[in-house]
Image (tube, rainbow, N blue to C red):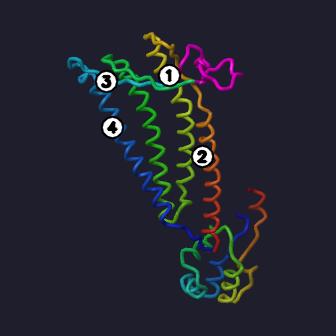
């Protein structure tokens, strides 16, 4: 049985993956260089760098931000607020610690993403070469699932620590607090990859059965 | 594996080389070698028919069930 696969689609997807992978490698290198050389950059007079960190607006964990409704057409609105208000706080600073925390948290995440895209490229390369069920691909997809799961917990934790470290030392109006530490979507994506890895393992087994059927 | 393939015995009895048989039945030598060394997971009826035709034997001459191996596994 031969399967008709459009060769252009996997190649297009691989091109996209190659571009994103290249950008991630560049980002890793740039972040690493900035982290290493930021003390030298900041030594210069009036030199500042921008530290950015994800924060929640509001001092409590729900990150509720009250808003004032001034001209509501519907008179029934009595009270309004933005729930789970979050954003990126950017600080232009010469404080090397803030810069380090900001870039270090991003670097860990970018390294994780780079590894995920590296694995995706390798799997797609096998698909393009006509051997999607190569024995190594199921462990690769499983590894993607584990890295996504790790990032699902690691990324919010790092962002939480970074935001906590920065916001506890500054007073801003409105009050800022560390962001929500948990992202459920990443857990779901991780489970999808881990499930896919199981299906892929089964496919590899079927292929092996077919190869050893004389 | 509880099913043993006695292809090597039949080949010796008939004085036929593995490569000759492979060419005659249209199976590659590596694949026939997999069958001979009991590494195959399944055999198609068409392959079995071709081997029996070339070696003038019955499927029962080629395949042997070993119940002791099955119990052991």
Q: Which residue is mark 4?
A: A29
Give the quadrant of residue A48: top left
Which callout, 2 or 1, points to the residue nearer the camera? 1
Residue range of the region highlighted in magenta in the rendering: A55-84
Q: CA–CA distance between discs 2 and 4?
A: 28 Å
Up/down of A23 relative to B52, above or below: above
- In the image, A15 versus A158, the foreground residue is A15
- Dot 3 or dot 2: first in sequence order is 3
Q: Which residue is mark 1?
A: A55
Label 1 Cα crowd, 10 Å radius (few <14 / some 14-19 / many 20+): many
SS at badge 3? strand
Label 3 Cα crowd, 10 Å radius (few <14 / some 14-19 / many 20+): some
What chain letter is assigned to the residue under label 3?
A
What chain letter is assigned to the residue under label 4?
A
Q: Which residue is mark 3?
A: A49
Residue located 46% across and 12% down the image: A172
For the residues beneath circles 4 and 1, the answer to whether they share a chain is yes
């Amino acid at each position: 049985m031969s399967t008709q696969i459009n060769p252009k689609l996997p190649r297009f997807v691989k091109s996209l993956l190659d571009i994103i992978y290249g950008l991630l490698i560049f980002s890793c290198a740039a972040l690493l260089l900035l982290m290493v050389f930021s003390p030298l950059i900041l030594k210069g007079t009036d030199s500042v760098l921008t530290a950015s960190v994800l924060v929640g607006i509001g001092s409590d964990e729900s990150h509720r931000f009250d808003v004032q409704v001034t001209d509501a057409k519907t008179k029934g609105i009595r009270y309004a607020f933005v729930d789970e208000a979050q954003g990126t706080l950017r600080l232009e600073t010469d404080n090397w610690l803030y810069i380090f925390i900001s870039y270090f948290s991003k670097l860990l995440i970018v390294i994780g993403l780079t590894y995920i895209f590296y694995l995706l490229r390798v799997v797609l390369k096998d698909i393009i070469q006509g051997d999607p069920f190569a024995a190594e691909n199921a462990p690769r997809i499983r590894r993607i699932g584990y890295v996504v799961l790790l990032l699902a917990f690691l990324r919010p934790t790092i962002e939480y620590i970074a935001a906590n470290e920065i916001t506890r030392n500054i007073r801003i109006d409105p009050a800022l607090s560390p962001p929500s530490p948990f992202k459920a979507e990443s857990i779901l994506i991780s489970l999808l990859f881990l499930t896919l890895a199981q299906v892929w393992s089964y496919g590899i087994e079927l292929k092996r059965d077919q190869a050893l059927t004389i | 594996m509880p099913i043993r393939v006695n292809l090597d015995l039949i080949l010796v009895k008939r004085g036929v080389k593995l490569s000759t048989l492979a060419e005659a039945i249209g199976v590659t030598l590596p694949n026939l070698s997999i069958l001979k060394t009991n590494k195959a997971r399944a055999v198609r009826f068409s392959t079995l028919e071709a081997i029996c035709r070339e070696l003038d034997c019955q499927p029962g001459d080629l395949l042997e069930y070993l119940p002791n191996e099955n119990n052991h596994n």
